[in-house]
Image: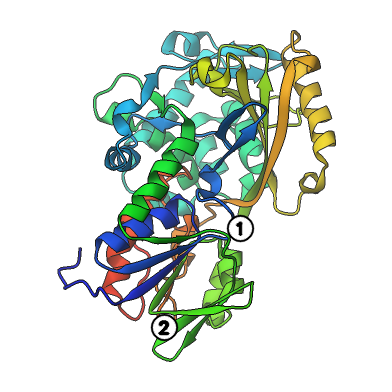
Amino acid sequence: MTGQRPLRSERWAILGGGILGMTLALRLRQAGREVTLLEAAGELGGLAAAWQLGDITWDRHYHVTLFSDTHLRKLLTELGLEQEIEWRVTKTGFYTDGALHSLSNSLEFLKFPPLGWWSKLRLGATILRASRIKNWQRLEGVPATEWLRRWSGRRTLEKLWLPLLRAKLGENYRKVSAAFIWAIIARMYAARRTGLKKEMFGYVPGGYARILDHFSQYLLRNGVDVRRNHAVRRVEATGPGVTVEFNAGSTQPFDRVVLTMPAPVAARLCPQLSADEQQRLASIEYQSILCASLLLKKSLAAYYVTNITDEGLPFTGVIEMSNLVDRRHFNGNSLVYLPKYVTTDDPAWNWTEARIREGFCAGLQRMYPHFRQDEVLAFKVSRVKYVLALATLNYSQRLPPLITSVPGVAIVNSAHIVNGTLNVNETIQLAEHAVPLLLENPDSLPFSPK
């Protein structure tokens, strides 16, 4: 990758076995390094991991592959799975003013009741404008609400954009830059730049349980030493190498270590970081998520995603996965995700699963009068504290370098996705971009996104 002869005796440790860590481990091994992948949990995958829900196994959080997700599709080709992707055109719904509305094509957009024709014209102009912006860095200094008000107008901001921003970010919507909106629109419109009229949504039969199984086996075949249930307590530079101390008390030396966990965790594990690095890592703010998975006897509606603009509902969106994935994968039932994005200190973080179930089912009854609680076959809640790094003002300029001041130690995590949104494709792209920088190994490398 860098033109230099591979150092086969150089020992690397990748801390964190999510998609990012797995991809880094694979590419470094393919570059000739000896690589050990260390994961604290009993399974690989991180946010992409699957779990058991009733009598099915599927993704713990909702994921979709877009036709324009070239990095993910390239990896799936390498794993022998890309040709198995099943593609669909899905529908999008909006729950606003106490009613469900379809917003899946241009005609439905023109008929969308909450906005007048002038507001719709300005909304369309906003999306078109964002889809054509190339210099996204200029948007980092502009608050999202200010940019949206300028382009969409006050009514569209208050009626549509603000409820959507609050649903995703809570009161943190005030902190994000216009680059956050640009990244969302850019991903959804990527296919149109390649000539497709519609963005295709797809999935691999078996979900991420199957993808991760293939990926894990592929790592082993390529010579990566994969270790699950290996929680790390401390990372410390010790002379010519780096020592990794495990929670169990043992230690192991490596030549290079890459931490892929969220910024607060990485900072805690590596106390030798400089005061400036600690401050930069501490300044990264995260959103948390409570995500309920429900297995239902009956479908709720015809939409894959239903955006919610009304206040008072306990969740921030409805994702009916069975409107994308053939229901045969769910034994004929319907799989629904109900996310609730919260701040890291939100009281909802400590709600019991029983309280969440009661509130979420009441919310479904409000949205879908035909819904009955006895139709719920299984209900399970995932809680992730550090799920989304907020794209605050001038965000990319404040990130710490990939190569830290601690000799042999690098930090690469999802917070380095500065010109995209958090999804599997962007995570793989980050790993592919980071590997050449890691192999160059200068004293300090600022992160310079493509």
Can residue 200 be seen at all in this image of the molecule? no
Left or right: 187 in relation to 294: left
* Quarter where residue 145 is shown: top right
* Quarter where residue 200 is shown: top left
**What residue appears at the point 37 percent right and 55 percent down from the top-left corner?**
220
Q: Is residue 1 above or below residue 183?
A: below
Which dot marks residue 328? none
The amino acid on which the numbered mark 1 sits, given as a three-letter code, is Glu
Left or right: 355 in relation to 396: right
Residue situated in front as seen by the camera: 150 or 263:
263
Which dot marks residue 407? 2
| Residue 211 on image: x %, y % | 42, 39
Mark 1 and mark 2: Cα distance apart in space? 26 Å
Q: Mark 2 or mark 1, which is nearer the start of the sequence?
A: 1
- Looking at the rendered structure, the number of numbered marks drawn on it comes to 2
**What residue appears at the point 72 percent right and 16 percent down from the top-left corner?**
367
Q: Nearer the viewer, mark 1 or mark 2?
A: 2
| Residue 295 on image: x %, y % | 66, 23
> Circle 1 sits on which residue?
285
The amino acid on which the numbered mark 2 sits, given as a three-letter code, is Pro
* Quarter where residue 234 is shown: bottom right
